[in-house]
């Protein structure tokens, strides 16, 4: 049964807090929420997020930015109706730089945002990940699959951190009655990805545009399923505004499965690049296959991806071409040493 394929706007303007709102996914979500007339509070420590992503929003009357680390307690005076928990480095290159910090972000961040949601009576959505399935032994991956995660491997800080965050969501629901939603996000791509995040699409596009060798780890036969950012953001909003009885977990991703080598050749074709392909060793615990079962999202939310891979790649390539042509600095450095809490910006009040 589909409740409504149209994202309801609501009778009164709601206030939405987006933790990780200056990041790739978060900034697009902030855009979409503002376009729907919401008041948006963007919370980000700018480790992997960027002011550039939200710069056009800074003077918007319904937008506020707070530089803050979710590992520290959060106290906001304003009303909050919705909380999106997106704050965590998402690429192996970034989250493995500070694995303990990554685990703390997943766990302490979830607790602090859940406490905020509990105190405000707000609904909260946890941005979980397909990485909770690990290197899956079941293919494709339904939400009922419990996963095959190595708890002591180099990716565990993120994989297990996200699994723990899901646990906390359901424990807060059972213990405190907090309204929760859990989205398991599969590979997503589009404008505002980081140049240096080491992920497949951004890596291939930047290498192709610069005429550098396209680096494929492993044989290239491993698969991924790539969802364009616009489709994902629409899915997140539909899940958030679904009836309170719908908690998830809910897979959000594109079920079109493609090999890594095929995506590399698609990028080469779209960029008309002469870059050669170079094969290197596959990193430890890197999943061999990844494809979501999206029956839950289709049946309950009326959601499925709309943007074809070729169209999404062209939009992403155009973004990176402009970035490279401007010869601007790298969007964001790798995770730095954690900074102390920073003061609020744009007239918002926050307790450190």
Image: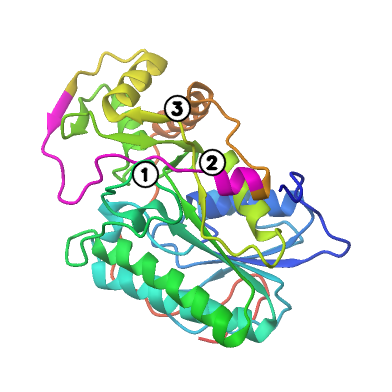
How far is mark 2 from mark 1, CA to CA? 23 Å
**Count of marks, rendered view:** 3
Which residue bears the numbered disc 2?
229
Q: Is residue 285 magenta?
A: yes
Please report the residue visible at 27 percent of the width from the left and 48 percent of the height from the top: 137
Residue 209, image x and y in percent? 34, 24
Residues 177 and 336: in front is: 177
Left or right of residue 11: residue 211: left
Which residue bears the numbered disc 1?
329
Answer whether residue 190 is visible to the viewer in this image.
no
**Residue 46 bears which disc, if any?**
none
How far is mark 1 from mark 3, CA to CA? 18 Å
Check disc 2 and report its element: helix, strand or loop.
Answer: helix
Q: Residues within 10 Å of mark 2 (few under 14, many from 20)?
A: many
What type of secondary structure mainly makes up the magenta span? loop
Magenta stretch?
278-299
Which residue bears the numbered disc 3?
317
Left or right of residue 340: residue 178: right
Residue 259, image x and y in percent? 31, 28
């Amino acid at each position: 049964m589909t409740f409504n394929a149209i994202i309801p706007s609501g009778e009164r303007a709601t206030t939405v807090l987006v933790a990780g709102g200056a990041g790739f996914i978060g900034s697009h979500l902030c855009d979409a929420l503002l376009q729907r007339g919401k008041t948006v509070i963007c919370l980000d420590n700018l480790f992997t997020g960027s002011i550039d992503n939200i710069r056009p929003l800074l003077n918007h009357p319904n937008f506020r930015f707070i530089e803050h680390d979710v590992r520290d307690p959060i106290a906001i005076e304003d009303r909050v109706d919705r909380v999106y928990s997106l704050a965590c480095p998402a690429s192996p290159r970034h989250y493995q730089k500070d694995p303990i910090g990554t685990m703390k972000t997943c766990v302490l961040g979830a607790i602090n945002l859940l406490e905020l949601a509990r105190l405000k009576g707000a609904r909260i959505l946890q941005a979980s990940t397909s990485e909770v399935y690990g290197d899956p032994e079941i293919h494709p991956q339904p939400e009922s699959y419990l996963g095959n995660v190595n708890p002591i491997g180099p990716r565990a800080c993120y994989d297990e951190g996200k699994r723990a965050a899901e646990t906390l969501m359901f424990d807060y629901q059972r213990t405190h009655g907090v309204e929760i939603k859990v989205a398991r996000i599969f590979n997503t791509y589009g404008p505002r990805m980081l140049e240096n995040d080491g992920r497949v699409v951004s890596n291939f596009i930047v290498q192709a545009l610069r005429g550098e060798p396209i680096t494929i780890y492993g044989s290239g036969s491993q698969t991924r399923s790539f969802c364009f950012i616009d489709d994902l953001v629409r899915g997140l909003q539909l899940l958030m505004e679904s009836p309170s009885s719908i908690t998830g977990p809910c897979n959000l991703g594109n079920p079109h499965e493609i090999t890594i080598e095929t995506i590399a050749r698609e990028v080469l074709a779209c960029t008309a690049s002469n870059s050669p392909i170079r094969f290197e060793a596959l990193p430890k615990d890197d999943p061999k296959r990844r494809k979501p079962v999206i029956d839950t999202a289709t049946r309950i939310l009326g959601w499925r991806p709309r943007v074809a891979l070729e169209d999404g790649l062209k939009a992403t390539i155009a973004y990176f071409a402009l970035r490279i042509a401007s010869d601007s600095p790298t969007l964001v450095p790798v995770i730095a040493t954690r900074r102390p809490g920073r003061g609020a910006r744009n007239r918002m009040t926050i307790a450190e």
